[in-house]
């Protein structure tokens, strides 16, 4: 079996070379052949220089350098489009996922599953990143019909038939786990180790997390529109009840002055619901507009193709 190890690289100049060497050690005694597909997602450090040298030294490496930062999921999509393996294992460049666990994911996949996700006894991310992951998990369960017990992890193994389905998606805002949930329900998970980050800090900022969540909301579910519709119905019912209550109160107490506070409160409430609705609809229309205009998932600056797989 040929295993494609797909690595999205962003500001990973200090970690990518040790990661490649560790992957080589893992497969040195394995029964599988392997290739490494590295996609440099517009890094601001010396990642391009390091990755280029690695690709020139090792004939089992395919290196794709993107012209600009497109986002982790776009970089992964690029790697999946360039890999040729029977299985793709997606692993980050920060060394928090030990490469030795790759074979555990592949072993579980060979039991007949389409996708195997890693899961952790204890995550070594920051509190902010862990809270974001929990929120992402709850939202995916609500919007994407993810099984409650399934933990969506960036470290995973994907079979070739599912890869072929995923790369059919041509939209500019891919969400890998959403695409996986769209094409299969054959999942499994295995516990793996999770190490402390050795260099730098997480590249996920609050802005990137919000962008990721919006991709999940808008691109892979219409439930947000249904939620807004429900909010509209609830606000209409609330407004009608308030109107009836005001009429009854006026009839019972003719001298009662008009309520300025209640009027302003109702106006602000309805105005907020309308603005939320318009904003959400605008997100759907805007993303559809960018998709229709042919916004690319990524733009390639250079490619160094692997010349062989490594045993």
Image: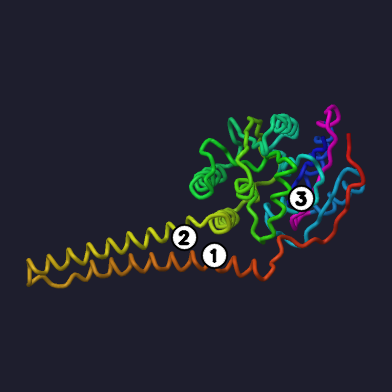
Q: Nearer the viewer, mark 3 or mark 1?
A: 1
Which badge, 2 or 1, comes first in the chain's sequence?
A: 2
- The answer to whether residue 175 is magenta is no
What residue is shown with label 2?
225
Q: Which residue is painted at 84% across and 41% down in the image?
A: 35
Asked whether 306 or 210 is in front, the reply is: 306
Q: Which residue is painted at 51% across and 68% down in the image?
A: 282
Dividing the image into 4 quarters, which one contains the C terminus?
top right
Quadrant housing residue 111: top right
Which badge, 3 or 1, comes first in the chain's sequence?
A: 3
Measure the C-alpha gap from mark 3 to mark 2.
Answer: 32 Å
Mark number displayed over residue 224:
none
Depicted 6 relative to depicted 236: above or below: above
Cβ atoms at labels 2 and 1 below 8 Å apart: yes
Q: Secondary structure at mark 1?
A: helix
Q: Which residue is painted at 77% across and 62% down in the image?
A: 299
Q: Position of residue 48 (x, y in %)?
A: 82, 54
Measure the C-alpha gap from mark 2 to mark 1.
Answer: 9 Å
Which badge, 3 or 2, comes first in the chain's sequence?
A: 3
What residue span does the magenta drawing correspond to?
A: 26-45
Q: Position of residue 266 (x, y in %)?
A: 28, 67
Q: Secondary structure at mark 3?
A: helix
């Amino acid at each position: 079996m040929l295993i494609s190890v797909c690595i999205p690289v962003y500001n990973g100049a200090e970690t990518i070379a040790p990661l490649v060497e560790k992957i080589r050690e893992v497969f040195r005694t394995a029964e599988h052949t392997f290739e490494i597909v590295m996609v440099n997602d517009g890094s601001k450090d010396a990642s391009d220089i390091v990755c280029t040298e690695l690709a020139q030294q090792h004939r089992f490496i395919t290196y794709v350098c993107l012209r600009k930062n497109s986002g982790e999921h776009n970089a992964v999509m690029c790697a999946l489009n360039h890999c040729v393996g029977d299985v793709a294992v997606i692993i980050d460049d920060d060394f928090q996922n030990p490469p030795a666990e790759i074979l555990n994911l592949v072993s579980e996949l060979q039991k007949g599953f389409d996708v195997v996700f890693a899961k952790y006894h204890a995550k070594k991310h920051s509190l902010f990143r862990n809270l974001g992951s929990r929120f992402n998990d709850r939202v995916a369960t609500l919007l994407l019909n993810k099984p409650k017990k399934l933990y969506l992890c960036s470290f995973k193994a994907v079979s070739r038939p599912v890869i072929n389905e995923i790369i059919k998606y041509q939209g500019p805002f891919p969400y890998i786990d959403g695409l996986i949930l769209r094409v299969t329900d054959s999942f499994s998970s295995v516990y793996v180790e999770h190490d402390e980050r050795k260099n730098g800090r997480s590249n996920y900022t609050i802005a990137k997390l919000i962008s990721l969540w919006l991709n999940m909301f808008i691109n892979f579910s219409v439930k947000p529109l249904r939620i807004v519709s429900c909010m509209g119905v609830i606000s209409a019912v609330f407004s009608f009840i308030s109107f009836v209550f005001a009429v009854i109160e006026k009839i019972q107490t003719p001298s009662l002055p008009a309520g300025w506070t209640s009027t302003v409160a109702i106006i602000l409430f309805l105005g907020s619901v309308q603005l939320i609705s318009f904003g959400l609809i605008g997100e759907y229309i805007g993303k559809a507009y960018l998709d229709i205009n042919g916004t690319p998932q990524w733009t390639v600056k250079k490619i160094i193709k692997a010349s062989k797989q490594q045993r």
